[in-house]
Image (cartoon, rainbow, N blue to C red):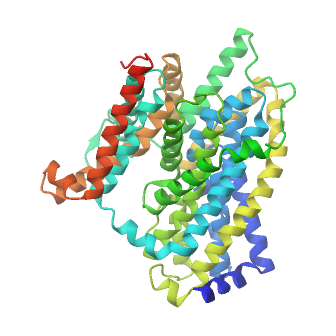
Amino acid sequence: MLDSILIGLQNVFKPESLLLIAFGVAWGTIGGMIPGINATIAMALLLPFTYSMDHTVAVMMLAGVYCGGEYGGSIPAVLIGTPGTNAAACTVIDGYPLMKKGRPGLALYTSLIASCFGGLFGATVLLFTAVPLARVALAFGPAEYFALAFLGLSMVCSLGEKNVFKGILAGFLGILMSTIGFDSFTGAKRYTMGIRNLNNGISMVALMMGLYAITEMFDQARIARSGSDLELKVEKPDMSFPKWKEISRLIPELIGCSALGTVIGVMPGAGATAASFLAYTEVKQIYAKEGGFGEGNTRGVAAPESANNAVTGGAMVPLLALGIPGSNSTAIMLAAFSIHNVHCGPLLFQNSPEVPYGIFISLFVANFVMFFVGYLCIKGAMRIVLIPKPVLIAMVIALVFTGTYAYSGEVFSMYIALACGLIGVILRKFEIPSAAVVLGFVLGSIMEANLRRALIISLGSYWHAFTNSTLSSVLLLFSVASIVMALVNNIRKGKSII
């Protein structure tokens, strides 16, 4: 193994490799900052330019784009309440309130530190445990995936804050929206209302941009029209770097959520968005007595950012060890491998160790470079808040529509984003959490598909589908316990359940 690591170091620490990794991180960060242009699109745009490159250098550059893209989405999430990427949607919940309180520096630098920590954690785990973790991923069948998704979905109770029922209602709304389009098993159309553009379902990018960006811009326009223009008016924003005391208190969350993100990344299909929401809800439950979540708690920024950046390391495990892309971004990397006639799988570590270990070492370099790139981007991005509000609102809406169109190539996605924005306004009026809708949407399709696979395997028996596996049974028990605890805590605090 030591010989393979040395080969990886030799490939990474070449002027050409270092320059392209740094370029990839910068490109990915900029792409992540633009709403709708996520890491996948940023990687896809560079894919044609890798034809003439050495295959090892090409995938190392794409790995840099992957890291930068996952981080970049947090910058607009904090500054304007608009997530640049799907995974940054959770960062809005506590990052944007910190911006409103005049402490954008604390939110932005916390996000940067958490992202780099999560990325380095995932890379470290990947370096030493890639092949064993691949075997763990293979141990997860349909029943285990369903139980894991159900566990995540049970956490919508904690997102209800003052009203558990509203959290559950929002989660079910997200699940319902995830079922729109073709049935993946039978091919039947579901809930399309005869609209052909809905056959492929609702785009996650359009949903995210609508519920967060469009809704927030409508709200800001309402505030500006009413004359109480105080929300984004920050006279002297505090852009100071957080003190060690403020960072050290977050170390438990950074470690725990990075570990969670790495594990989620190993499981094909889960992705950074699910990891960030699961990490946030877990931390929120652990520190329920501390409170302040949704009002500018730095733990609510560190948790999702460390988790979604740790996914970059975990997602490489099924890609390299099994040849299974765990996310859209790793699917682009698999395409790059195909272009250069490199075959992923267990034999890759024996026949071409320079490829996997080059990627492992490049992830370390990319995350260190990301810190400096992010630091420079934060300094420049802060000027966004100095833009007059009418101009800023128009710019954000234009970027959202451009991003949703660029992602899907369909004008109809812009209408979906607008419709979701109007839904978001209604949800905000009735204090129904949008985050629970997003969590239900993300996990709904995973849960449905794996439930049906498990039932096919068990010949239609719900009992045998989930009790034959100890792991799935334990996860389901934890899910039920999570719901019961949320209800009990609300009763004890005198809050409404329904």
Circle count: 0
Q: Left of 71 or right of it: where is 152? A: left
Q: Residue at x 71, y 51 (%)?
A: 113
At a point 60% along the width and 79% down the height, the residue shown is 357
In this view, the residue in front, 479 or 105, is: 479
Q: Which quadrant: the C terminus?
A: top left
Q: Indicate whether 302 appears above or below 157.
A: below
Q: Residue furthest right?
A: 236
Q: Quick one: 323 or 255, which is closer to the camera?
A: 255
Viewer-proximal residue, 300 or 393? 300
Looking at the image, residue 431 sits to the left or right of residue 388; the answer is left
* Residue 81 coordinates in the image, percent (x, y): 66, 33
Residue 445 at least partly seen: no
State the image coordinates of residue 290 (x, y, percent, origin top left): 58, 30
Indicate the position of residue 2 as horizontal and vertical percent values.
Answer: 62, 86
The answer to whether one can see residue 15 in this image is yes
Which residue is drawn at the image coordinates 80% and 23% (left, top)?
233
Instruction: Choose top left, top right, bottom left or bottom right for residue 102.
Output: top right
Q: Position of residue 486 (x, y in %)?
A: 39, 30
Residue drawn at x 32%, y 35% as measured from the top left: 194
